[in-house]
Amino acid sequence: MRQPLTYTSVAAAALLTLGCSSFGSGALTASGGFAAGCASLTGNVIPARQIGLPSGNATVDSAQVVAASALSVAERGPTPAATITPAMPEYCKVLGKIAPLDPQAPPIQFQVNLPAQWNGRSLQYGGGGFNGVLITGLGLVPAQRYETPAPLAQGFVTVGTDSGHVTRPGEPPQAFARNEEALVNFAHASYKKVRDVSVVLMKQAYGRAPSKLYFAGSSEGGREGAVMAQRYPDAFDGIFSRVPVLNWTGLQHAGLRDGLATVGEGWIRPAQVKRVHEAVLAACDGADGLVDGLVSDPVGCRSRLDITQLRCASGVSGDGCLSDAQVKAVQTLHSPYRFGFALANGVREYPGRGPSGENIASFGPTGGWIAWWLGQASPEFPPKPNNSIAWVYGAGAIQYFYAQDPNYDLRQYTPEKFEARVKAVSELMDATNPDLSAFHARGGKFILLENMGDYAQSPYAGIGWHASVVERMGRSRVDSFFKVYAAPNVDHVGTGGPANADFLGALTRWVEQGIAPSGLQLVEQSAKPPFTVERTRPLCEWPTYPRYRGGDVNSAASFECAR
């Protein structure tokens, strides 16, 4: 199934669907014209009393018109979507900052993009990793189909922030956590503050507030979306959260444990990763009725896969088998991490990861385990650039957030030694509150997408949070506002199988028309125009998964969502 898609036709359809709202008298709608109105926003001061949390004033440092631009695609990028620079309309680019209360804390930087043709909505983007980089709000929504116009091109005001700190070259990305206000801003406060500032700017620019506010984020940004629903239920009408790092404390501790398991003899070589991946496919690929390189039912795969079958026979070594230490490392990765005390909201463990997606490509020619868990070399002390992302991130988080010592010996760490601090950070960072009653009461809608071949974080953490919400609020009530979906075999960044759909469109229809998501398809497509679709699968609501029932193996119509 190779379907060429025309960008311009999709953009036109989206604009017709969304429409443009009328608005009152504002800087951008005044008789002086769009450019003059945009420039007039420069220097505006938004007093702290208009920001819903304690902070300093917000100041607009610059506001200037950016001309419309065409779609462009780079040859390389950290993710497939990151290579795409969508077409942009004419817009007013507003840059500014929110002053801290602590003079030693950094300001919160923000960018607000005001389109010349506004549809009355806004979309705030989440960040990634430890943030420290200003999110521009100009890219595609996470997991969005590549041919879809960017939200700004659809008429949304778009918003981004650096979360209240800037990561500088040569500085660990976790170093900001030594300042308490910067840590609180990263945890939750900055996103609410920037949301409030953006609403004031929209009132100034267009003469009225937005009719609907949306939030979309992936990974750390997905956590931010969940935090908004839990801590600030009145802030957003609709939230899309992809592969969110919800149990943040659990992930950092599991990451340390999983990394330590691969020190020395436990480290698994790239050729051995390929061997494990082949064993997973042999055990599980065809269980959905089709051998296609995708493990559609990773939960069932757990019972079918016996990693000890790859243990090297006595006196044998090499890339075709695993040593005792390597088998133990895999078993460790697959196992939950259990705390000896309760974290925020009574959580006591972090779920294991896998199987599926061990050797899929994500960052360059290698991905899966190699990019996230293993790196190109066994973990070092301190971490080196050729170590895995999880080791570099997790080791720094343990040192700066929990031990509060950048030189702490990770081999000596246990959470029990720092129990009070672990609990405090968990209360601050973890997005595991099962009580979404306030968000539901004000009409909020939440869509969660987990990629089941994810080794940056465990997809079962998000699935487990949803289950806790169901337990707290009841199935029928939760089904009316909160949906969780799974993309089988797909990596953290969206490679490894069909991973993209029109999630923003589904969310806006649910919020504004009461039409719950239904019949959506996940697509696997080229990241080059015309963004040809290679294969599709039904987007199945958890715990169902796509099972082949006959027909075109690349068409979603040939699959059903089965338990």
Image (spheres, grey):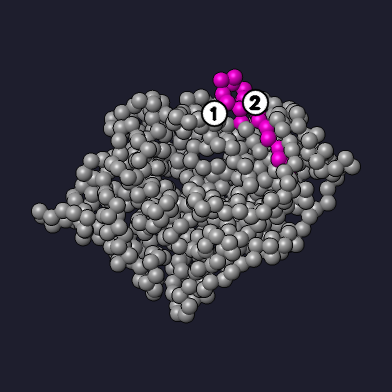
Residue 47, given in percent of the width and then of the height, sits at: 73, 27
Labels in figure, total: 2
Q: Which amino acid does label 2 sit on?
A: Ala
- Neighbourhood count class around disc 2 (C-alpha, 10 Å): few under 14, some 14–19, many 20 upward: some
Quarter of the image where one finds residue 229: top right
Residue denoted by label 2:
99
Residue 130 colored in magenta in the image: no
Q: In this view, does 351 lie to the left or right of 162?
A: left
Quick check: 230 above or below 536? Answer: above
Q: How crowded is mark 1: few (under 14 residues within 10 Å), some or many (20 or more)?
A: many
Give, as a three-letter code, the residue at label 1.
Answer: Ala
Residue at left offset 78%, top offset 35%: 39
Q: Is residue 545 above or below residue 469?
A: below
The spot of residue 455 in percent (x, y) is 39, 50
Sooner in the amino-acid sequence: mark 2 or mark 1: 2
Left or right: residue 205 versus residue 407 is: right
Q: Which span of residues is magenta-colored?
A: 92-108
From the image, tell me which residue sits under label 1: 182
* Disc 2 and disc 1 in contact, CB within 8 angstroms: no
In space, the residues marked 2 and 1 are separated at their CA atoms by 11 Å
Which residue of the protein is positioned furthest toward the front in this rendering?
75
Residue beneath the point at 39% across and 54% down: 365
Q: Considering the image in quadrants, where does the C terminus appear?
A: bottom left
What is the x, y in percent for residue 537?
A: 50, 68
Q: Residue furthest top?
A: 103
Residue 261, x across and y down, in percent: 27, 43
Disc number for residue 458: none
Which residue shows up at 26% across the image and 54% down it?
272
Q: In this view, does 406 lie to the left or right of 222?
A: left
Q: What element carries label 2?
A: loop
